[in-house]
Image (cartoon, rainbow, N blue to C red):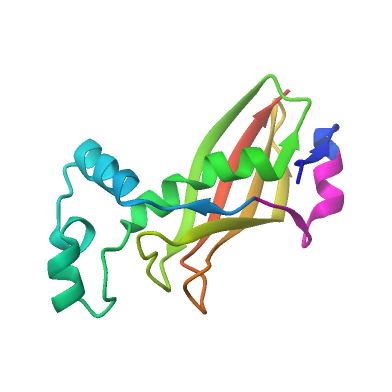
């Protein structure tokens, strides 16, 4: 499904409290998890050793790093919502993050984005998004976050 397009930054105010987009489903492979482990230096067995994870972990297989799931939010947002009218967008940070359920390797994730708040700052608009990352192999979200972006006009 094509992303929802918002052509006017100030129109974001009308979306406060509403969902603005949902990404497509994306497979989480062992190769993705390995690449993330190599990039971050986090080589814990629960992410990389399938046989040991099958035997010893409560999840029955390897799982993605929570921070891998969190790092996908930016790319998932790009396919869910296109917000036009800014000359620059800056990731201002994350106010709250939780990982309620694991992302098992070979499952799929997608993200839902809602606008929580919009604040005018003179040369920019600060927008707080509620992000819920769902996993097709879990009953609960695998990541919930409050993500703050600044859109410079």
Provide residue 77's location: percent of width, then percent of height: 62, 44
Stretch of the chain drawn in magenta: 11-23
Provide residue 109's location: percent of width, then percent of height: 52, 58
Provide residue 151's location: percent of width, then percent of height: 67, 31
Task: Specify whether residue 18 is painted magenta.
Answer: yes
The front one of 15 and 82 is 82
Q: How many marks?
A: 0
Q: Residue at x 24, y 36 (%)?
A: 39
Q: Residue at x 62, y 35 (%)?
A: 150
**Relative to 75, 39 lies left or right:** left
**Relative to 84, 72 lies left or right:** left
Q: Residue at x 48, y 75 (%)?
A: 138
Residue farthest along the top direction in this orientation? 87
Quadrant of the rendering where the C terminus is positioned: top right
Provide residue 70's location: percent of width, then percent of height: 43, 52
Q: Residue at x 73, y 47 (%)?
A: 118
Above/below status of 136 relative to 88: below
Task: Specify whether residue 99 is painted magenta.
Answer: no
């Amino acid at each position: 499904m094509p992303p929802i397009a918002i052509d006017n930054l100030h129109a974001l105010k009308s979306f406060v409290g509403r969902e603005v987009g949902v990404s497509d489903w994306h497979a989480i492979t062992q190769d993705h998890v390995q690449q993330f482990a190599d990039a971050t230096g986090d080589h814990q067995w629960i992410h990389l050793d399938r046989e040991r994870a099958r035997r010893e972990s409560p999840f029955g297989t390897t799982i993605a790093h929570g921070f891998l799931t969190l790092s996908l939010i930016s790319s998932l947002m790009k396919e869910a919502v296109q917000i036009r009218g800014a000359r620059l967008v800056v990731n201002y940070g994350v106010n709250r993050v939780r990982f309620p359920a694991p992302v098992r390797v070979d499952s799929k994730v997608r993200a839902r984005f809602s606008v929580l708040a919009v604040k005018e700052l003179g040369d920019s608009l600060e927008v707080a998004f509620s992000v819920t990352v769902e996993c097709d192999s879990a009953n609960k979200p695998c990541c919930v976050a409050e993500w703050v972006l600044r859109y410079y006009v």
